[in-house]
Image (cartoon, grey):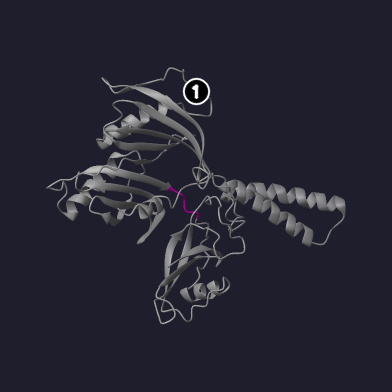
Amino acid sequence: MKHDRIVSAYDKAGPAPGTEERIWRSMQARLSEEAEKAPRPHPLLRRAVLAAACVALLASLLTVGYAAYEKWKLPAPVPYQPDPEYGNVRVHTEQRHSVTPQTETVTPAESALPPEEPEALSDLYFIEKARSILNRAGIPGPKDGELVVRRQTHLYWNREEAELSWSRDGTPYSLTFDAQTGVFIGMSGIDWVIEEMAACPTQAQADELARRYYESLPVEQGYVMRSCEKFDEQFWSYDFCREVEPGLYSSYECVRVAINPVSGALVNCRVFYVPLLDDHEPGDVPLTEAQALEAIRSAGFDPEGWDTVTVEKTVGLPNWNFTDQMTIDAQAPAVSRLCWSVTLYAGPDETTPFSTETWILVDYYTGEILGGDTTG
């Protein structure tokens, strides 16, 4: 079992609020900048012109929205300080709840639960929701001991979470929800078994089992099964992704379902829901592949001299790498974008025994460098 690969694969994408607010602030800044550059008329005339402009702008916004007036640009990153104990998660409270073994009904612990706050969902709400999900997936719930509800902030995704965790027959389980909306985010309950006969002896049977689990969960339906990554014989991970346009799928509007084809169990699930912001207008012309290659030169990458160079249209999540705003730890942006993904590959040679692969995201319409990464 390659634990590091699984952690990496299941922690790549998610949402962040505030897109419209940032666009509105950007519009205000743009208007102020243009006003400063313009010749200054008589004060009374200037006030009249500005008032008329504001009325016209408001009417236009109500008619066609923000995007027609200010194209999205890569916002400044919002840095965060990782928690010294939990990394990307900052834990606020842990509330223990007792479990009645006979009925497996969760009851409050000795200390009574605080009353439900107007803008928060109670522990019992998430416990009952977790039971519903476990029943749909055919997974047994807690049967003895204690169940822990942990309230935490996910620093990278900038969201409040409620994580429920317990152990059953020596196997740890957890379910995670958005603490403010109640949206199901994911679950984990890996079980390792030694069986003479696999529950899914064929790839087709495993695919169908993964699809049934996906359709049983309270997640966005209608996504397309795009991939199956086999980490080992008992951990197969499937991605069900939204088809943005014919043949183009988003990994950031995606449900990742992992099954154990030997036991037939659902062992992991992660829900990614970073919406695609495609604000181009009918007259906008996307960059060509050649223009995308020219754009990466501004990030200091010369396409010449690499063994392989590929350019592929994709849905990308900006991360500020290869820009002058790069920071080590920054919150995820609120939206994903249509991009050209330029991949540069160099294999081992006489100077190094290692291969290197670098990919750079170029906004599909504006040509702005949005980020990327290097492996190898």
Q: What residue type is labelled 1?
A: Glu
Q: Magenta span covers which residues?
A: 273-277
x and y, in percent, of residue 149 in the image? 43, 30
Q: Main secondary structure of the magenta part?
A: loop
Q: Residue at x 54, y 72 (%)?
A: 295
The residue identified by callout 1 is 116
Q: Nearer the viewer, residue 124 or 334?
A: 124
x and y, in percent, of residue 359 in the image? 46, 67
- State how many labels appear: 1
Residue 79 visible in image:
yes
**Depicted 276 relative to depicted 115: above or below:** below
Q: Quadrant of residue 323?
A: bottom right
Q: Which of 32 and 206 is in front in this view?
A: 206
x and y, in percent, of residue 95 in the image? 45, 27
Q: Is mark 1 on a helix, strand or loop?
A: loop
38 with respect to 272 (left or right)? right
51 with respect to 120 (left or right)? right
82 with respect to 197 (left or right)? right
Q: Quadrant of residue 73?
A: bottom right
Q: Which of 47 and 361 is in front in this view?
A: 361
x and y, in percent, of residue 180 in the image? 49, 34
Q: Which residue is drawn at 27% across and 37% down?
A: 137
Residue 103 colored in magenta in the image: no
Mark 1, residues whose alpha carbon is within 10 Å: few (<14), some, or many (≥20)?
A: few
Q: Which of 262 and 255 is in front in this view?
A: 262
